């Protein structure tokens, strides 16, 4: 069994992203990401802090756009349109969920698709469905793909099982695996004999958001297990969807939580911002 450290994957990907950012800077373009946050949610602030650190480390400028929790739809849309229309901003990251007075579906439609670096605009989600590489896939599913690439695991012909069907992770993750010619099964809360279905998988991708759901009973000998879940245990510590202690001895590769997929996601975000800057400047 090999534990896949997200920091190793992020370092390898980050080296390429940094070189591309430097090349853009040499052409007079400084890649820039705007992070749009509403309110003072501690989780959002922590994620923002980590994203800023990683983006700046890789040569990407960051603009923070913070709005009060009680912001109106009209005020929010004006801020979004300002970012859409600013040529110095190449990528927009919207921290979600949004407060209830804001229409998230309308906002998703209005964010510029070419700056939508975390794929909330329906245009980008459709491109994921169509296998169109000109758009952006959500960062977390692409981080999973980066991890599989890092260990040199081709998905063609493999049985891949995704646990979870959210629009943020589960569904796009299944589509990305399908685009690589995997045979994909998507499981969810109503899947009968979940453990039995999962044991058929060569690659098991857990993204359901239920602490310790995946145990040794769900893992086939030698399977690759990637844990996308972020949960908190009774002691207040981060943990994943996979019971790491029981599953790890059976798997050939496995990611930990923390220190796995989450460590790669912000580097994928940086990659998307750089790619957006290149596309917007014809480079």
Image (cartoon, rainbow, N blue to C red):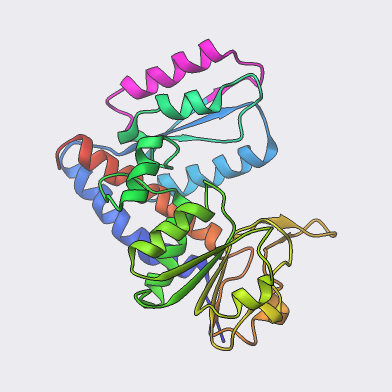
Residue 56 figure quarter: top left
Image height of 1 relative to 274, above or below:
below
Instruction: Give how far across and how far down residue 139 sits, in percent.
Output: 45, 50
Whether 65 is drawn above or below 141: the answer is above
- The magenta segment is 66-91
- Tell me the quarter of the picture where residue 100 sits: top right
Q: In which quarter of the image is the N terminus?
A: bottom right
- On the question of residue 266 being in view, the answer is no
Report x, y in % for residue 8. 46, 70
Taking the magenta stretch, the answer to whether it contains residue 78 is: yes
Residue 224 percent location from the top left of the image: 52, 78
Name the residue nearer the viewer: 136 or 30: 136
Q: Is 86 covered by the magenta stretch?
A: yes
> Foreground: 264 or 168?
168
**Observer able to see residue 35:** yes
In the picture provided, is 12 more to the left or to the right than 96?
left
Residue appearing at x 64%, y 81% in the figure = 248
Q: In this view, does 64 lie to the left or right of 137?
A: right
Quadrant of the drawing holding the C terminus:
top left
Q: Which residue is drawn at 73% across and 67% down?
A: 212
What residue sits 55% from the left and 14% below the top?
Answer: 73
User: Looking at this rendering, what residue extends furthest in the front direction?
Assistant: 192
């Amino acid at each position: 069994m090999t534990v896949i450290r997200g920091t190793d994957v992020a370092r390898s990907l980050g080296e390429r992203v940094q070189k591309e950012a430097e090349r853009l800077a040499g052409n007079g373009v400084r890649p820039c990401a705007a992070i749009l946050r509403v309110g003072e949610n501690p989780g959002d602030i922590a994620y923002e802090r980590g994203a800023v650190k990683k983006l700046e480390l890789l040569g990407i400028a960051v603009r923070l756009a913070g709005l009060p929790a009680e912001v109106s739809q009209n005020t929010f849309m004006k801020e979004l349109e300002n970012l859409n229309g600013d040529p110095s901003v190449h990528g927009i990251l919207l921290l979600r969920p949004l407060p209830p007075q804001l229409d998230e579906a309308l906002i998703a439609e209005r964010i510029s698709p070419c700056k939508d670096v975390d794929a909330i605009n329906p245009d980008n989600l459709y491109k994921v469905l169509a296998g169109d590489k000109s758009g952006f896939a959500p960062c977390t599913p692409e981080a999973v793909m980066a991890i599989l690439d890092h260990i040199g695991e081709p998905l063609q012909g493999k049985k891949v099982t995704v646990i979870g069907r959210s629009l943020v992770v589960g569904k796009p993750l299944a589509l990305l695996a399908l685009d690589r010619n995997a045979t994909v099964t998507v499981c969810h809360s109503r899947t009968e004999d979940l453990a039995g279905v999962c044991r058929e998988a060569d690659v098991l991708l857990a993204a359901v958001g239920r602490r310790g759901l995946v145990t040794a009973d769900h893992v086939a000998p030698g399977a690759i297990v990637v844990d996308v879940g972020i949960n908190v245990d009774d002691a207040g510590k981060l943990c994943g969807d996979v019971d790491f202690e029981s599953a790890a001895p059976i798997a050939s590769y496995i990611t930990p939580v923390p220190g796995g997929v989450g460590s790669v996601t912000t580097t994928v975000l940086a990659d998307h911002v750089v790619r957006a800057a290149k596309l917007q400047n014809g480079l």
